[in-house]
Amino acid sequence: AITGEGNNGDFNDPSLDRLIFSPVHYALVLYSLLVEIGRLDIAAFRRYNKNGSTVELIGAEHSPGHAVTAGSLSQALSQAAGIAYARRLKGHTGRVVVYMSDGEFQEGQTWEAIQCAVFHKIGNLSAVVDVNGQQCDGKMSDITDIGNLASKLRAFGADVKEVDGHNVAEIEAAVKSYNDVTPTIVLCYTDPCKGFPLLQKRAPKLHYVRFKDETEKKVWVDVLSTMDSEVKTDASISNANSNTKHRLEENSENEERAAKRQALPIQATSNLTNNGIETSPFKAGNVELVTRPHRSHLVDWIKLHPKAIVLTADLTSSCEADVVRDNLPDQYLSMGMAEQNMMSFAGGLAREGFHPYIHTFGVFVTRRPFDQVAMSIAVPNLPVRLLGFLPGLTTPGGDASSYR
């Protein structure tokens, strides 16, 4: 298969490590890193999130820096374990390193992958986990708490390292410290607001952060301008301390990239009417198009049906169920990032006379939990309603292959 892994280096070299990127909704960060190290031209951003472009909003295996398609979280670790096992069979000395988020440990497949890797002694596999305690719907401890992650992983037999996720030297040392008989998991504890105190005002919900108005947008533009100025100052100091032409050229390139980043436009994306219904920035003639009709009527319907229960899988706002969560908490359940469990759980509710309304992305009510939908809902003919959002036709990021 043709993948974007070529941006990372020669992945056919048996001595080199391989990077598998799991939280592909972080793709923009990976693209930026590739630009900084000179393995992707900054012009690639002109094609970012455009129809037909490989520089996708949610990366797929054809996207720069991506080796696998991993839009359904937790699947990358299983794929990486298979790659690592195959490399061992072929006598490769290079390791396989997976970058993950802590939210993926709400998914059952993550634990199946670890169990498998430990049993088969896949010691050439490492996972670097961003433990930030956040997921789409807010703090993980408020959604589906995963408890003491380090203790659980050690109980499974993994070699666990715990480090400060803001200390690059600690992370590097932990990744390089491994054994050859069991997978290594590096837990990097991070603060998602570090360096951005403005984000504290939005806590604890730090996903889908959008500008509320032009005033807030200007505040962020000023902050980013200050940060770019500091980068340029640091580069100038480095130049003064360096006597090599190569170093001078490198910092010159960094300054040019920083200037180009500063020139990129920042656009507000929130459009709310006075009654709280979200509208599209597009118009048909002089009429604004209402884009979230389900949200505006859902809570009224649920009020009239006391046995109705809305279930979500960490995508509550994206699936317009936040109004039920906020107004009718007794008729709402957050299941965390565990769609397969959610389907069977809903089947159990339906057997006891309740009416579950499942809300998640279209791919997560079809592809991922197909067997659970068939066995727990369809075969017994239970009254479970499945509502799939962002089908990948006209929705933001809809061109992402893994979300279609």
Image (cartoon, rainbow, N blue to C red):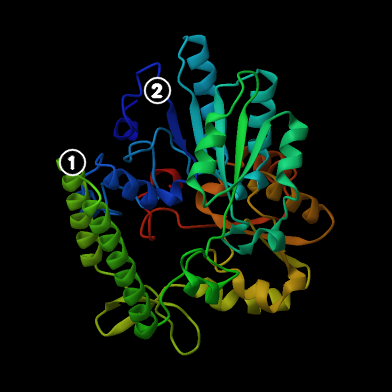
Q: Is residue 265 visible?
A: yes
- Nearer-the-camera pick, 239 or 33: 239
In the image, taking residue 300 as reference, residue 25 lies left or right, namely left
Q: At x 54% / y 33%, what residue is drawn?
A: 175
| Horizontal and vertical percent position of residue 207 | 51, 64
Q: Which residue is mark 2?
A: 16
Q: Quadrant of residue 12?
A: top left
Outermost residue to the bottom: 274
Q: Is residue 334 visible?
A: no
Q: At x 54% / y 42%, what residue is drawn?
A: 170
Please tell me whether residue 317 is drawn above or below residue 156 in the rendered image.
below
* Mark closest to the chain's N terminus, 1 or 2: 2
Q: Which residue is mark 1?
A: 244
- Nearer-the-camera pick, 301 or 79: 79
Q: Amino acid at mark 2?
A: Leu
| Horizontal and vertical percent position of residue 165 | 55, 49
Which circle, 1 or 2, is nearer the viewer?
1
In the image, taking residue 163 as reference, residue 347 lies left or right, namely right
Please tell me whether residue 61 is drawn above or below residue 101 in the rendered image.
above
